Image: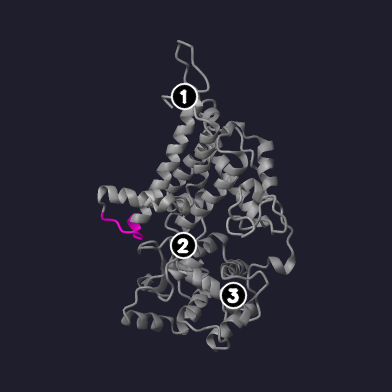
Amino acid sequence: MADKGRLSGLELNVLRSSILTSDAPEIFNHTANDEKPPVDRLIALYGLPVSQGSDTYKTMETEFRSSYKAYCQHVLDYDKSMEEYDLSSAAEPSRSPSSSEGMDTPLSELVRRFVEERVRGDNWTKKSEKEYRAIFNLLLAILGTDIACTAINSKSAQKVKSTLQQVPKNINSNPKTRGLTFEDAITVVGVERMHVKTINKHLNACHGLFKWAEKNGYVSKNVFTGLTIKLKKSGDGERTAFSKDQIGKILSAILKDETSAIKKEYQRWGPLIAIYSGARLNEIAQLQLGDVRQVDGLWCFDINEKADGVRLKTSSATRLIPIHSELLELGFLEHVERLMKAGKQRLLHELSLSQGTGYGRNLSRWFNGPFLKAVDMSGQGLVFHSFRHTMVTNLLQSGVAEPLVKAIVGHAQEGVTQQVYFGDGYTVAQKKSALEMLKWK
């Protein structure tokens, strides 16, 4: 640029396209003339002791993509800075972020800063980070990477909403749309469009981005407020909790071997723990044997992030859940003891860690598919997560105070009293008394 001046239109499009696609692994694995990927060339150049497929190699790939995206953006910003000349001799007075930062900050840079802050603050799981990056890449495809965040108005937000309703489902993997430009993909006929729930997920993510932008002085107004599509509740299709009869049927199928769908230990103990604890799928799937321990004389599940590869959804998820007496009567502690003698470390040791989704993928797939079909409950809006809704619903219906219910299932408390002055929370004995109000057998 020092020699020939500003970038050409082709060069600008290449850089913009690179920013949109730099999160895709294939971009950095595909090279012409059988040339090695850039990370491999870097390793070879400096003689680094890093092998393909290792954690260090994956980290290098991630950092390479991030630095390449930042490089492209800086080149675009520098080119943009050459549009005008400042002929004034006096220094301009300092301005607030809303008038200087916001006016000059492209949407792509706003997204980068927001994501960087969320990742740095450890606010997202790896799975959530991947999902948000994909959502924001789609936002950039719709509005453009260079548009100033202050130029995004209500009309822009409506454009995002209307465009999302044209986006094909699984746009990057559907054979009919894979490989097409975004503009061409949304015009393809005969393909299923993005579900309303997914559209709302995108709009909520955009709302979160611009809420952050408003608080940090980049924009004066969150134009994505109130844009989600209202869904009509449709009876059985919207059911999210099991009835007591359905819980009884599930228990009977598990305890009396009434279905051939149960072939492994995790398929027995995973649903049983969910029924009696209301814990999340991954909280159950990643439990260590050491997480089953006594506190104040009561056996509990210690939900924590102490072990390698273990991750909780929120800080409120760290908690103690007393083990229900009915689960103890089913031989749970004896099962734990057998696993310890066998040298196992995790309770559901047959489950393996899936990148970005944790340990619960196979348990979820088995329960939501073969098992629910075997007990004639598929197609009713019921999934493994329904156990949590069942727990919350039945505790509240039994007269348990909502803050205590939240403490049991790991939801954040609300209000100054609960958040500040009740720092120690409810005792294990109080939680135990509440859980024992529910009798399932």
Quadrant housing residue 320: bottom left
Are the residues at dot 2 and dot 1 in contact (C-beta closer than 8 Å)? no
SS of the residue under disc 1: loop
Q: Which circle's residue, 2 or 3, is located before the other in the chain? A: 3
Q: Which circle's residue, 2 or 1, is located before the other in the chain? A: 1
Q: Is residue 82 above or below residue 33?
A: above
Label 2 – label 1 distance at C-alpha: 67 Å
Are the residues at dot 2 and dot 3 in contact (C-beta closer than 8 Å)? no
**Circle 3 sits on which residue?**
369
For the stretch drawn in magenta, the main secondary structure is loop
The location of residue 310, given as percent across then percent down, is 40, 63
Q: Is residue 80 above or below residue 67?
A: above
Which residue occupies 38% across, 63% down? 309
**Circle 1 sits on which residue?**
5
Neighbours of disc 2 within 10 Å: few (<14), some (14-19), many (20+)? some
Whether residue 415 can be seen here: no
The residue type indicated by label 3 comes to Gly
SS of the residue under disc 3: helix
The location of residue 220, given as percent across then percent down, is 59, 32
**Circle 2 sits on which residue?**
426
Q: Nearer the viewer, mark 1 or mark 3?
A: 1
The residue type indicated by label 2 comes to Tyr
Q: Which circle's residue, 1 or 3, is located before the other in the chain? A: 1
Label 1 – label 3 distance at C-alpha: 60 Å
Q: Nearer the viewer, mark 2 or mark 3?
A: 3
Which residue occupies 48% across, 45% down? 115
